[in-house]
Every structure is written in C-alpha cells, then in structure tokens.
Image (cartoon, helix red, strand yellow):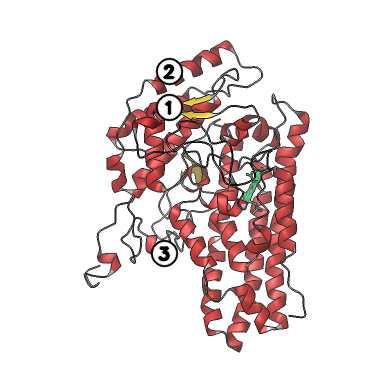
Amino acid sequence: MSHLPPDHFLSLPRPEAVMGPPPGTVDTTTLAAHDFDVDNRTGFMPPQPPLTRLPESWSPWEEVLDDAVASNLQLGDKLDLSDADRSRSAEWRARVRALPILPTHELKKSEILLRRSHHVLSWIMHFYTRTLPPSSPDIRIPPPITLPLLQVSEYLQLPPVLTYSDDVLYNWELKMPQGPLSPAPELDNLKCLTLFTGTRDEEEFYLSSARIELRGVEALSIMRATMDETFVGDDIAIRRITAYLHSLSSVIGELTKLLLAVREGCDPQVFYNEIRPWFRGADSDVDAGKKWIFEGLELDPTLTYPAELSGPSAGQSSLIHALDVFLGVDKYSHAPHVTGVQPTAGTPGTSSSASPTSTSAPDSKPSVSFLTRMQSYMPRHHRNFLRHLSANPRPLREFVETSANESLTEAYNAAVTSLKKFRDAHVRIVAIYIVGPSRRNQRPMADLKGTGGTNSIRFVKSVRDQTAGAVLDSAH
Ligand code: HEM
C-alpha cells in the first residue's frame, strides 16, 4: 500500500466496527469492505476459511459449545427422550447459567472476532432454548448469553439469533488443504465447523447452500460486466449484454442442479424431525403462547428487546436476492404484499407493545416484504451491496424495455425464466422436506411454518408465481 497517497481510503486505519466509517467515507471494517465484502473468488463467502476459535479470554463460550456438541444434546420435545438425555441437557444448561458474563468491548476491534462470537453465542442460545422441556412456560435466555450476544449483535447490526451467515457463510473449513493458487474452495472440499446433530444430513443441508454461494460467484461477475455495459448502452453493449444474460441463465441452471442435489445427502425425514427443530426462533413459539425472555437485558441500558428473532433460512442468501434485484424481478417476486407472514388478529401494522427496555417480546411484527425483513439478517456489508444494486441509476430491466431489441428481450426473459425454474425446484424441495414429512407427523405438532416465519409452501409458491409475472412481452 506504500504507493497509495496517505489520504486514500485504503491507507486509513480501520474504523471501529460499531461506529462504522465517518460520514462520506467507505466502510473498511473488513478487508474487502470497499467492495461490500463481496470477494471476486468466493462472493458472499469469505475468501479465507472462517476463524475456528476465539482467543483465550472468551474460551468459556467455546468450551460450553464444545461440550454441547460432544454431549449429543437432544431436542427437549423429542418424543422418546430418555431420562439420561433429559438430565444431560439440564446439567449442560446449568453450566451455561453459571458462565461468567464476559465483556465484549475488545471484540469490537475485529470483524472476524465479532463474527465468530456471533456464531458461538447464537449456537449456544439455540442449544439452550431448544433443549428446554416443553413444559417450560416461556423461553428464558440467561444473562451470560443475553448480554454478550445482544452486544455483539448490536455491533454487527444483526439479530441475536442463528442466521444464514452463522450456519452457512461462516461455518466451513477445507477438508483438504488447497494450493495457494486455488482461486476458491472446490465445491466438494468443504466441511462444516458446527452441527447440532453431527449427522451427514445436517452438514449436507448447510453445504448445499454453500456450494450455491460459490457457484454463484460467476453470476456476480456477469452482473458487474452487464452493469458496465448498460452505462455505454450502444449496439455493441446490447450484443454483449445479450450474451451475458444467456450465460446468466446457464449459471442459474447450475444453481438449480445444486439445489436439487441436496436430496443426495440430506434425508427429508431426518431434516424435518431431527435438524430443522433446532433452527426455530421466537416466531415458532408464538403459537404455543411462549415468549422469549432475555434475562439481564436491563443490566446494559444500551440494549433493547430485539425486533427480529426468526430462525435461519436460506431466504437470507444475498446471492438469490442479488439476482432478483439485478433482474428487476424483486418488485414482483418480493412485492411489499408478499410478506409470507399471516396477519394475526389485532396485528395490522407496525405498533409494538414492548417498552425499549422490556426483557420480553412485543406483540406484533411489522408488515414488510420478506426480502426487506430478511435483509436485516444479512451481514451489513452484504445488505449495503443489495441497496447499492437497487440504487443502480441504469437498471437492467428498464434498459431492456427502452432498447426494444428482440434478442436482448429474449435473453432477459431467458434469465428471468431460469430464476423461475430455480424457484420451481425450490417449491419441490419445500414439498419434499417440509410438507411431506409433516404429514407423517413424528413431531409433537405438524409444523408447516418456515423458519423465516412464513407459511412455507404457500409463500414459496407465491414468490415463484410472481417471478414468472416479470417476463416481458416480446413486443418490447
Ligand atoms: C432442504 C432445503 C431447503 C428447504 C427445506 C427450504 C425451505 C424454505 C422455506 C420454508 C422458505 C420460506 C421462508 C421461510 O420461512 O424460511 C424458503 C425461502 C427461501 N429459500 Fe429455501 N429452502 C431450502 C434450500 C434453499 C437453498 C439451498 C437456497 C439458496 C441458497 C434457498 C433459498 C431461498 C430463498 C431465496 C427464499 C426466499 C423466497 C424466494 O426468494 O424464493 N433455499 N426456503
């Protein structure tokens, strides 16, 4: 960097993660943040394998998580839970409650430490809440988890709950070392860092998304090249964009194959009955009338009751949203009325009955599109990337419409249709992994709600149908 002038943004010291950069300057809290933390080899996945261990000062968290994994803890509402299972998880929860409340200020110095902390604390929280006996009247998260998890989440601007970044983006390592010249991890050279069940099915479930993220890097570079060409906008540009859009259709076709390949390693019954219940966030406890209570919240006056507490969902993948936004399909697929959430009586709008310092949940959830709600679960640099993409002054769809070029329109429609086919496949996956197993009903209650809080199959079908509606008339 010695050749850079001292006032260049890359020469400036990293801004404090929590404060962000001063107004008018670029956020450089991560190495690639000047590029929205989107790497040209690994896209929304980090280019280096994520940190696997926090420094010594925070080892009590790491140890209690190791212990949860090694103890093979079982879901609290498992039908054939043995007394030994029950007492093992009760002992583990007692250990969590006895943890010291560790300070988090030093973690703010590094985005990488903050990410690992969010990963460790949110996995502990899910192990804790989901092993509670079903007879517990509410879900109480003890202070040694509440305080650091809410503080770390505040710094990262993420909800204090397991997110797609905790179980996919930052939950991998290489099976075998790759040479320094390898541009990105090979799709079959990944394994996961943390699992609830230790099963291959669970690992394959996360890795199917990870592979989609890595294969999607080519889509990101096509988007970049297309955006450059729309600025030129001449006949050559139109020809190039036409070719790029055909390539994009093929890449989305590859993503569809990778999505369907989840069936090779992840059994639907195991997914529905043994894996998915671990993901449940506060939404899933609403029907049972249970509130999440963050004990100790009042000890830090800067903290408030979290607004968002849905479980992790690949609906938080920035890649799929980026495709929607780039193609201008999001106005259809994720129109404001496509919230996925069934309005409940007396919860029409945005009002909330919890006071800022209340330790328990507000009664209602704002009615915003699923896309908008899921963006708050994405790493903030990725959220900014999507905002930047939305603010593109020469949107592709408009460009295609005004160009009125038949080949270009056809290529655009092919890309939209490819995205619609991805969603056809996704509807099949939701039918196989959620609707089918729910009919056999091995769990206490048939659970058709998505972990993102939607009415799963109805919602994914409506997003798919809206995507199809974005195809342009060939007259354009
Ligand atoms: C077994 C595998 C999968 C199942 C059972 C599944 C299930 C679901 C469900 C139930 C929803 C509704 C939202 C919610 O409440 O969470 C959803 C949404 C979504 N999922 Fe999946 N999903 C799977 C794999 C994937 C993968 C691998 C991706 C891509 C990386 C993906 C991308 C999305 C997207 C983008 C949405 C938002 C709706 C849309 O834009 O189409 N899903 N998924």
- The circle on residue 295 is 1
Query: Upstream in the sequence, badge 1 or badge 2?
Result: 2
| Residue assigned mark 2 | 94
| Labels 1, 2: front one | 1
Q: Amino acid at mark 2?
A: Ala
| Residue assigned mark 3 | 35
Ligand 1 has an atom within 8 Å of the beta carbon of the residue at disc 2: no
What x and y, as percent, mark residue 129?
52, 27
Q: Nearer the viewer, residue 340 or 420?
A: 340
Q: Amino acid at mark 1?
A: Glu
Which class describes the residues within 10 Å of circle 1: few (<14), some (14-19), or many (20+)? some
Q: Nearer the viewer, residue 462 or 246?
A: 462
Q: Amino acid at mark 3?
A: Asp
Q: Is residue 184 left or right of residue 263?
A: left
Q: In the image, is residue 456 above or below residue 3?
A: above
Q: Which residue is farthest top?
A: 83
